[in-house]
Image (cartoon, rainbow, N blue to C red):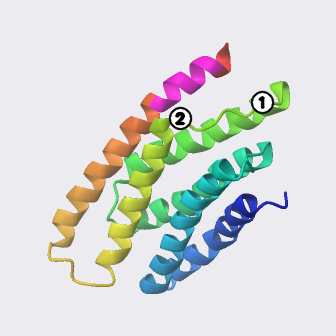
């Protein structure tokens, strides 16, 4: 557990509730700064783990959990604020939680942890983009109305959901086998 990659992942887990508290207190600039920091740790933990051969089963377990701890509460927050479609958020969050539970059960049975597929990685990046735009819209005038932004971020959210569900099909087929 004493690897830089795992420490970056743990820092993302620690940042998750702080980001949510900042959003709840309308401190969007600080939430955005910490959110971007969390997104960067998501990139760098994987990069460092691969480059310096620090990939571990623990990192493979914690990384997707850390992503979900950062992303899902933020999606729910912006859904409750009316910016994001609650149905899309609910389906995406439910899918993410279900896949995480299945992965942990599989790990218990087989002691092998599947790496995230490309669809899942793209979904995570899209989620980071959606949430960055949502936070930015509360900080600065981005030149479009909140209604237009709503269409843009919900379109991206729908795309993230499609990627997520299509990536899940491959995962679930392997899990059931």
Please tell me which of labels 2 and 1 falls first in the chain.
1
Q: Which residues are magenta?
A: 167-174
Instruction: Find residue 105 and report its horizontal and vertical position in percent.
Output: 77, 32
Q: Is residue 94 visible?
A: yes
- Judge whether 132 appears above or below 52 on screen: below
Classify mark 2: residues with Cα within 10 Å, few (<14), some (14-19) or many (20+): few
At mark 2, the secondary structure is loop
Q: Residue at x 82, y 25 (%)?
A: 110
- Judge whether 31 appears above or below 83 on screen: below
Occupied quadrant, residue 96: top right
Q: Are marks 2 and 1 in contact (CB under 8 Å)?
A: no
Residue 1 drawn in magenta: no
For the N terminus, which image quadrant?
Answer: bottom right
Occupied quadrant, residue 112: top right
Residue 173 drawn in magenta: yes
| Residue 59 left/right relative to 143 | right
Instruction: Find residue 74 and report its horizontal and vertical position in percent.
Output: 49, 65
Instruction: Find residue 128 and report its horizontal and vertical position in percent.
Output: 43, 60
At mark 1, the secondary structure is loop
Q: Which mark is residue 112?
A: 1
| Residue 175 left/right relative to 36 | right
């Amino acid at each position: 557990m004493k690897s830089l990659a795992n420490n970056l992942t743990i820092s993302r887990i620690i940042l998750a509730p702080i980001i949510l508290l900042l959003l709840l207190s309308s401190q969007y600039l600080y939430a955005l700064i910490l959110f971007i920091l969390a997104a960067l740790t998501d990139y760098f933990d994987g990069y460092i783990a691969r480059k310096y051969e620090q990939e571990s089963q623990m990192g493979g377990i914690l990384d997707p959990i850390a992503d979900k701890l950062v992303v899902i509460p933020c999606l729910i927050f912006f859904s409750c604020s009316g910016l994001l479609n609650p149905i899309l958020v609910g389906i995406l969050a439910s899918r993410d939680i279900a896949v995480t539970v299945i992965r942990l059960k599989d790990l218990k049975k087989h002691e092998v942890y599947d790496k995230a597929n490309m669809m899942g990685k793209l979904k995570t990046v899209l989620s980071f983009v959606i949430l960055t735009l949502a936070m930015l819209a509360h900080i600065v005038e981005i030149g479009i109305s909140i209604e237009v932004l709503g269409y843009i971020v919900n379109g991206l959210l729908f795309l993230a959901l499609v990627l997520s569900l299509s990536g899940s099909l491959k995962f679930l087929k392997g899990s059931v086998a």
